[in-house]
Image (cartoon, rainbow, N blue to C red):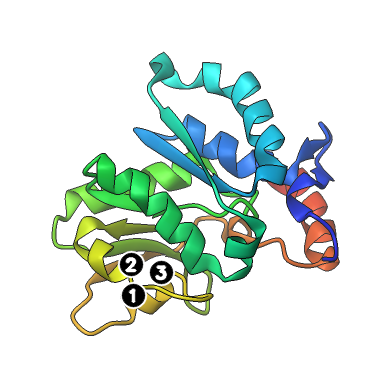
């Protein structure tokens, strides 16, 4: 977009785009949350937590922030995933739920449904939403794929893992497909403004 899209204001309240996804994660049933971010955006995440973290039920969500340099971030999505994994592996997590900050319409209820489906079927390697073309974030990856995740490189995301032979997953269709909007262009930003009004 030629500018930092996560700092763009959206909606009647003028919230930053990046604040929406973080708020959804804090309101979900996640036990731990790792924010992987460049240092230039740290003020955004801390600002959201100052206003929203106190609203997490019983202060249940433990939040860690993992900084990634601009140079590392430019090397692709895999670097962010691997950085976030370091915390999850220390916590012996059953899985990792990858949430993108540029998907502002994802809700806590959507994340909770993924976790419920994952826990209900121990044989699953992943649970993802389907955007009509392919599995899409938010994407929950089982710990059984962690070793393969460590080998991701460049701009490979979790999609590269779930295409491997023998991987069993569940692709979920959201009740409102528009909620999988990924903000990449100016057109997407204008679409987001309209959807925020339409979806309520």
Cβ atoms at labels 1 and 2 below 8 Å apart: yes
Circle number at residue 149? 2
Cβ atoms at labels 3 and 1 below 8 Å apart: yes
Residue at the image point whose x is 66% and y is 58% from the top: 70
The answer to whether residue 138 is visible is no
Could you tell me how far apart the alpha carbons at marks 3 and 1 are, in whole angstroms?
A: 5 Å
Q: Residue at x 45, y 31 (%)?
A: 63
Image quadrant holding the C terminus, namely top right
- Give the image location of residue 92, x and y in percent: 21, 43
Q: Is residue 121 left or right of residue 172?
A: left
Residue ID for mark 1: 161
Left or right of 134? Residue 162 is: left
Ranked by sequence position, the earlier of labels 1 and 2 is 2
Expressed as whole percent of the image width and height from the top left, the position of residue 77 reads 53, 66
Query: Any mark on residue 158, and which?
Result: 3
Spatial CA span between label 3 and label 2: 7 Å
Q: Residues within 10 Å of mark 1 (few under 14, many from 20)?
A: some
- In this rendering, is residue 145 above or below 14? below
Q: Is residue 183 above or below residue 17?
A: below
Residue 109 marker: none
Q: Quadrant of residue 1?
A: bottom right
Please tell me whether mark 1 sits on a helix, a strand or a loop: helix
Alpha carbons under labels 1 and 2: distance apart: 7 Å
| Mark count | 3
Quarter of the rendering containing residue 47: top right
């Amino acid at each position: 977009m030629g500018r930092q899209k996560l700092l763009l204001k959206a909606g009647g309240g003028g919230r930053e785009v990046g604040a929406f996804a973080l708020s959804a994660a804090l309101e979900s049933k996640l036990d731990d949350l790792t924010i992987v971010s460049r240092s230039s955006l740290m003020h955004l995440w801390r600002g959201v937590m100052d206003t929203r973290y106190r609203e997490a039920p019983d202060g249940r969500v433990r939040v860690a922030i993992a900084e990634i340099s601009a140079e590392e971030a430019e090397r692709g999505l895999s670097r962010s995933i691997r950085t976030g994994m370091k915390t999850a592996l220390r916590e012996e997590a059953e899985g990792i739920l990858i949430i993108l900050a540029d998907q502002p319409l994802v809700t806590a209820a959507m994340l909770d449904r993924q976790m419920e489906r994952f826990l209900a079927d121990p044989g699953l390697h992943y649970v993802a939403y389907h955007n009509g073309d392919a599995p899409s974030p938010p994407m929950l990856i089982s710990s059984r794929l962690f070793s393969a995740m460590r080998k991701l490189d460049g701009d490979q995301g979790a999609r590269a893992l779930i295409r491997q032979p023998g991987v069993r997953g569940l692709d979920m269709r959201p009740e409102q497909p528009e909620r999988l909007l990924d903000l990449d262009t100016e057109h997407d930003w204008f679409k987001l403004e309209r959807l925020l009004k339409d979806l309520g």
